[in-house]
Image (tube, rainbow, N blue to C red):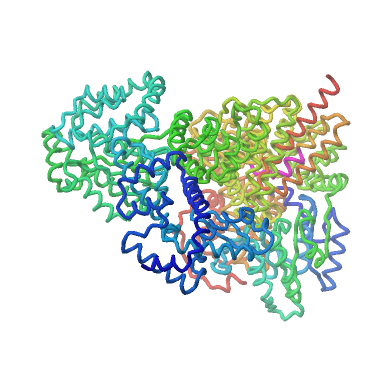
Amino acid sequence: MLWVDKYRPKTLDHVMVHDLIAQNLKKLVTEQDCPHLLFYGPSGSGKKTLIMALLRQMFGPGAEKVKVENRTWKVDAGSRSIDIELTTLQSANHTEISPSDAGFQDRYVVQEIIKDMAKNRPIDTKGKKGGFKVLVLNDVDKLSREAQHSLRRTMEKYSAYCRLILCCNSSSRVTEAIRSRCLNVRINAPSEEQIADVLEFIGKKEGLQLPSGFAARIAEKSNRNLRRAILSFETCRVQQYPFTSKQAIPPMDWEEYISEIASDIMKEQSPKRLFQVRGKLYELLINCIPPEIILKRLVYELLRKLDDELKHEVCHWASYYEHRMRLGQKAIFHIEAFVAKFMSVYKSFLIATFG
Amino acid sequence: MDMDSEMDILPEELELLESNYQLLEQDEQDYYSYIDETEPQPQPQSPKLIDLTVPSEPQTNGYKRSRSNSPDDVSLPVPSDGKRVRVCDSSVAAEAEEEDWLRYSPPPVAAEEVRFVKEKTVSRYASEIDGECMPVTAPGGDRVYAKMDRFQGEERLKKLECSGYDADLSSEPIGVLLERWEHEAFTKTLEASSECQSVLEVPEARVVHEQLWVDKYAPKSFTELLSDEQTNREVLLWLKQWDSNVFGSEIRSTSDDVLSALKRHSSISQNQKPFDSKFPRINRGSKWSSDKYRNARSVDDSGNSKSIQDTWNTKSRGTGPPEQKILLLCGPPGLGKTTLAHVAARHCGYHAVEVNASDDRSASTIESKILDVVQMNSVLSSSRPKCLVVDEIDGALGDGKGAVEVLLKMISAEKKPDGGKQSSGKEQQGRKSSKKGRKTASLSRPVICICNDLYAPALRPLRQVAKVHIFVQPTVSRVVSRLKYICNKEGMHASAIALTALAEYTECDIRSCLNTLQFLSKKNETLNAFDVGSQVVGQKDMSKNVIDIWKEIFQRKRTKMERTSHRSKSFEFGSLYSLVSFRGDYDLIMDGVHENILQLNFHDPVMQKTVKCFNSLEVYDIMHQYIMRTHRMSLNVYLPPVAITVHNIVAQVQKPNIEWPKSYQRYRTTMIEKMDILNTWRYKTPPHIARHLSASSFVEDLISHLLHILSPRTVKPVALQLLSDKEKNDLHQLVSTMVSYAITYKAKKSDMLPNNLRHEVADDLVMSLVPPISDFINFKDYTSNHYVLSLAMKQVLVHEVEKHKILQANDKTMALANGPREVIDAGTKKFQLANSNHAAAVDMKTVENQNVLSKQMNANPTSVSRNINSNEVVTDNSKPLTKGNRKTPFSFFVRGKKSNAEGFQSNDGSLQKESASKKDQFPLLFKFNEGFTNAVKRPIRIREFLS
């Protein structure tokens, strides 16, 4: 078992990074009046951990007993009926689904399946009053606009005995209407100090000797992603123990690859080179690296090697092309367009300065 | 008698009449000249014709004629002619009753008279006349407005009255004149038609305007064909190869004759056919074709003579019908495929029977029809065998399929008997078939199929058996010369430049060209060279091959008319637009543009052009996505301009090297595959881990590190009892990680070896991770520095993982048996428990271990026979993992003293109690066979579990 999972806080009391939020959530739950919740924040910051701890706080250890179910729903969509396959995680009191898995049919998931789940009152055997059940929806930001619209009514209508916990990376893609119906909980990325603290805690638990500054180095490399930090900490442990302060922290492979691309771009600016870059970009995309991440990392790598004068312009163009990428469908067009633009800007800059 | 009385009644009017008569006469002349104008004929010819026709005219006409010509006859009494008298009678009666009104009523006459009386009051436009006016339509169709003048009316009435008196004048009105004129025209045509027996190109169309130029100037003979020489000749050659089969020996098909004829491609070749005389000889046509022949020959002769020689050789060897019994002609519309088929068939002596899309083409009807054509010898058309021309075979898919199937069936039916009777005189057989027709449905007549799209799915089977000829566009110059010739014939003025533009615009579609020309000539317009695009020329709704479209986009045409750069640009825009939009498959087109754009050679020093191109591609992508999302298909019209923008930026004169866009599709499919792998992996991992990870975070955060973690450099594939505590701990950690992430190793064949396994021993057997997560970092041109475990280590790990899984499953069942007290996330908790209990367990175990070691001496002989893995298993007693393992059953059985669980484990437990040595050995040696146990079964009460 990886340390990531091993040292994941199980209860709100044990939460280390977002302890303030955890305390607030605990208060919320103990008052027996939990609104709909919307957790948002970058990946690896602890949204899911918090949600799980919250559920445990609500329902006790039974919440951790889940069963995975791959169910097929038959949804009647006007003239025809559609089969939708979804994986659910279910415990006695809550259900977890990712409606965006259904792709463009997510509307039906929301309209039919979620409504169906929300409709059924939980049966409380012990006769507790005010029992409600919880629906955890993952990746709400990936839901289509239509699906989000149809979610609104469900949220209101069945709020007496059903709570929704929504989880997403960015709240900007969640419609205003949904955001206003939820208590928004922003889970920001843990700061490097916090990450270092967690790493030191784990090291102590594992009985490891950490050289001073080592945890900080890992935290710095981790891009403020706690999961990644813990994983690379464990990797370091596996590769070399006892630690030395100069120990290399193994990089992510795809990041290495992107920095190769960046140096390719810096070396030569021509359509030919762009074509080579295209091949490499395809390689990354094939391996399921999201295009936004590729673009972001690429800009990061390029900025490191760039003259200060150009940084502002390159950032501008990067955001410009990322926006268009999100509007469009074929990510490769947009990433390549950015690379072409960068090449053009950079080359004209080189010509202007060095003649 | 009546006439006389009339004259008596109005004697004073006569004077007026006399004075007006000159004018009337003049008016009549006017009328004639007016008719002349309406005729397309040149003016001077008309009076001459009239003169000529006079003698041949029937008697009645002659009278009329003479009367009109000679004004002196006015006062003479009319010769008794029944018809005339009646006319006069009626006119007189009308006059008597209604005076002038009836006379006034026929508008044409009135028009003439009004015009003659008051020229200024007549105008083409009503607005030009002030005061009252009335529309008047002349017999020629001209419409004028005449001013109504009350005052003048009096005078005119008088005049009309007097004209009413005059018998000749009253008979002159337009009806009669028209009749006469028609008759003249008729006789003229008669003359012309008699003349036309000798001349093919007759001016009859001038009179009968209904005939289309396309039909009128359709090539009547082989030499007139416009299509590519080589194709023509090969079609002819193919048809000739049937000769021996169809005509038998009746007509000798001497090879030399035909060959030379084909090679020279002159009308001489027709001479050998007896029915040649039926083809009208063309005087002007041959002249025209001879110069066409000259330039075509210079191009074709050198290249083609050899290929013809070849085909000919193959032909002359076998005397039967050609190898491929079906000829498939394909090409874009309007190039003359159908014409070629018909002309060639006729040329070779066949009677062409056409089945086209407008006929019923279901399989049954077509079969009967084909049988009819192919096997029967028609009684009516004396000696001519039939040749089937299946036109537009690709047109209607379902129907066309029927036709194709029938044809294929017949071919296959043909092949079988032929195979048997190969040696038995084919010629004879052929002759017999031509006479009587065979019982088996087989092809014994040439069949020519015509299609536009060779690659239509319905034609796939036919393509393999048929001889395929692809039509290419005739050269523009040929088309233009033909058009010029026709224009000259029709007396239409069209400059060569205009015709060239037209031909280029229609892509040498001669049918479209002719229709356009005819249309314009009808409208009396001339073809304007620069308005071809904007004029009513119908453009073909023809979708081109995608590759061609990409070529169009990337290639700039070398324009000859640089001066009209603006115009040509707009023309280019239009043609590209229609090209792209007809094709419709924008996604594919744009993928192709994206794929190839970087391979082009365009001058782009600071890559601004590239940036522009990519920006337009982005625009396309965004628009496309928007359209797809909102289903506003009407916005699709804005997609082709993107391609045009790209064209304007990058198009080069030189020929681009187009590649089919594969990379995007490849990316899509591979990504989906990998996504699948990730999802199944995620599904397999236990929910308490998987729920925290999304598929993308697997790749983003996890895999790289996981690969490091899974392959520590410190573990060595040695006997487990030789490991230190720390190493054991590491190993255990590793195994539990693998289990919790549902990862294991699997043996694969070495040819599927991924290239990054460089630490692998060169072995036949290769262990790789399952699921194949190492593939996710296996980028092209990238070497990761991941350490890969040795094969032995992997084998150890596989074994450990298996064992661990079984233990976990065991734990679960036992946890269930133990009741809800202990159940907290059975799999993992148990293990943590086991881990934390190590220290405590060690004391207990040490005692046991000594025991084990002593026993192992005894056990060794049996384990020698096993492979190394099991050997390790036997010896790994002291491993913490097995401790945990033994710990759990131990604690369980300690707790439930008398209980005995079902299955071997409990059996093992009970044995364990009896003898320590056995207890140590059993957990290690078990081999689980599903559905089989050799354990001792014992009845047990449920409360024993619960206690």
Q: Nearer the viewer, residue B440 or B557?
A: B557
Q: Position of residue A268 (x, y in %)?
A: 73, 24
- Which residues are the magenta region? A287-297
Residue B476 seen: yes
Q: Position of residue B752 (x, y in %)?
A: 51, 35
Up/down of B339 relative to B405, above or below: above
- Magenta residue check for B339: no
Q: Nearer the viewer, residue B742 or B33?
A: B33
* Magenta segment, prevailing SS (helix, strand or loop): helix
Quarter of image, res B872: top right
Q: Position of residue B244 (x, y in %)?
A: 18, 33
Q: Quadrant of the C terminus of chain A?
A: top right
Q: Is residue B495 left or right of residue B216?
A: right
Up/down of A354 relative to B914, above or below: above
- Magenta residue check for A289: yes
Residue B771 seen: no
Q: Nearer the viewer, residue B405 or B497?
A: B497
Q: Is residue B748 left or right of residue B362?
A: right
Quarter of image, res B430: top left
Q: Is residue A35 left or right of residue B440?
A: right
Q: Position of residue B377 (x, y in %)?
A: 17, 45
Q: Nearer the viewer, residue A273 or B78?
A: B78
